[in-house]
Amino acid sequence: MDIYRIIKEPRITEKANLQKEGANQVSFKVDRKANKIEIKKAVEILFKAKVLEVRTMNVRGKLRRMGKNSGKRPDWKKAIVRLAPDQNIEFFEGT
């Protein structure tokens, strides 16, 4: 799989910011078919950072209603990547 298709977008939330500060972890929305090894390689190549651990989870889309019509948001996959202590990703630093 192409490394540019594996990582879709970073997940920037309050919890992700706390993980970044406390445990040097960053969160990404990734392709649903990607495995941990592919995610690790993609992060190391794209961001040039040493990855120690990758944890993944499948997130179910929520049911939403607009009046009498109901629908469902799409399911997606989330990856939490733990970086080496001396590594960081500038995208999350705001530069």
Image: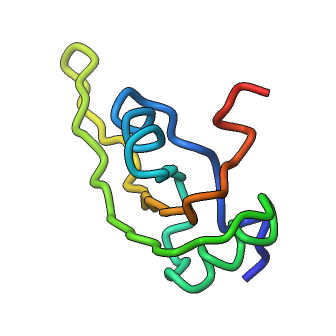
- Asked whether 71 or 77 is in front, the reply is 77
Q: Quadrant of residue 44?
A: bottom right
Q: Quadrant of residue 76?
A: bottom left
- Asked whether 8 or 95 is in front, the reply is 95
Residue at image location 34% in from the left, 35% down from the top: 15
Q: Is residue 77 left or right of residue 2?
A: left
- Asked whether 61 or 13 is in front, the reply is 13
Q: Quadrant of residue 39?
A: bottom right
Quadrant location of the N terminus?
Answer: bottom right
Residue at image location 44% in from the left, 59% down from the top: 80
Q: Please state the horizontal and vertical placement of residue 70, each as a whole percent of the image.
A: 24, 31
Quadrant location of the C terminus?
Answer: top right
Residue at image location 44% in from the left, 33% down from the top: 17
Q: Is residue 89 above or below residue 13?
A: below
Q: Please state the horizontal and vertical placement of residue 31, each as a whole percent of the image.
A: 57, 66
Q: Is residue 62 left or right of residue 86?
A: left
Q: Residue furthest top?
A: 67
Residue at image location 61% in from the left, 76% down from the top: 40
